[in-house]
Image (cartoon, grey):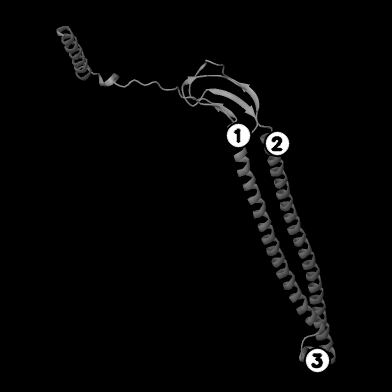
């Protein structure tokens, strides 16, 4: 009975000592011990790609910026080619409208100048006739003593024609200005349309170029290459 009591007291004493040691000598730095999984980064693409070149092997140490793999996307290559061809087509059409506009302006100018020269020639001719008639009338009047009744009662036929020609010349110049302004406005709208098309195509091309750059994967952290499964 005494041995049994001593045995129980001994184990109670041991438990108390262990509890005291656990409370008094506990190190807060090592109180919690945990095991964590290493951080893993996997490389994947949202569309089918073809491996172009792998720059690493399993177990290799890498640092941020190291190139890991370069791939290519057949559909992306086709999209870039289509977009490039489309931009070239728009630029050719843009150049054609510039040439068309320049030719139209030149044609309007040539036609206007041609009509003006013709009218100026007729004006000079009518002025010459009017001047000659005036001289003849004065000479005839001084010889006969009669006064030209046409000059007394109004303009002669050639003077009326001269007024008509002057008005026609003014009309031709005004018409030329209107046609130039109209052609300029039409050309401006067409030019804006092609500029907007090119701007949109350039933005789409930038997106494709960004996707193309993403085909080259680089390391983002320091680490070790795991499995390389292709």
Name the foreground residue: 3 vs 206. Answer: 3
Q: Is residue 223 above or below residue 85?
A: above
Q: CA distance from mark 3 to mark 1?
A: 101 Å
Measuring from the top left, give residue 138's x and y in whole percent: 80, 85
The tag earlier along the polypeptide, 2 or 1, is 1
Q: Secondary structure at mark 1?
A: loop
Q: Secondary structure at mark 3?
A: helix
Name the foreground residue: 30 vs 89. Answer: 30
Q: CA distance from mark 2 to mark 1?
A: 17 Å
Question: Residue 46: which disc?
Answer: 1
Residue for point 60% across, 44% down: 203
The tag earlier along the polypeptide, 3 or 2, is 2
Q: Based on the displayed image, in which of its 4 quarters is residue 229 positioned?
A: top right
* Marker count (numbered): 3
Name the foreground residue: 161 vs 210. Answer: 210
Within 10 Å of disc 3 (Cα), the crowding (few <14, some 14-19, many 20+) is few
Residue for point 28% across, 20% down: 29
Q: Secondary structure at mark 2?
A: helix
Q: Based on the displayed image, in which of its 4 quarters is residue 79 positioned?
A: top right
The residue beneath circle 2 is 78
Residue for point 82% across, 78% down: 129
Circles 3 and 2: CB atoms closer than 8 Å? no
Q: CA distance from mark 3 to mark 2?
A: 89 Å
Side of 228 where 129 appears, left or right: right
The residue beneath circle 3 is 149
């Amino acid at each position: 009975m005494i041995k049994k009591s001593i045995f129980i007291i001994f184990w109670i004493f041991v438990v108390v000592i262990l509890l005291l040691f656990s409370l008094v000598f506990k190190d807060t730095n090592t109180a919690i011990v945990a095991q964590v999984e290493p951080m893993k980064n996997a490389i994947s693409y949202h569309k089918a790609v073809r491996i172009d070149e792998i720059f690493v092997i399993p177990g290799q140490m890498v640092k941020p910026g190291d190139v890991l793999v370069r791939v290519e996307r057949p559909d992306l290559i086709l999209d870039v080619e289509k977009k490039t061809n489309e931009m070239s087509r728009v630029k050719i059409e843009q150049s054609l409208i510039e040439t068309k506009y320049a030719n139209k302006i030149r044609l309007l100018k040539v036609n206007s100048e041609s009509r003006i020269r013709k009218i100026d020639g007729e004006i000079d001719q009518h002025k010459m006739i009017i001047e000659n008639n005036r001289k003849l009338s004065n000479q005839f009047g001084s010889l006969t003593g009669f006064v030209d009744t046409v000059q007394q009662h109004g303009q002669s036929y050639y003077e009326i024609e001269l007024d008509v020609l002057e008005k026609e010349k003014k009309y031709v110049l005004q018409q030329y200005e209107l046609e130039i302004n109209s052609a300029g406005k039409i050309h401006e709208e067409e030019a804006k349309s092609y500029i907007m098309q090119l701007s949109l195509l350039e933005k789409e091309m930038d997106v494709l170029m960004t996707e193309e750059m993403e085909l080259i994967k680089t390391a983002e952290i320091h680490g070790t290459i795991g499995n390389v499964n292709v």
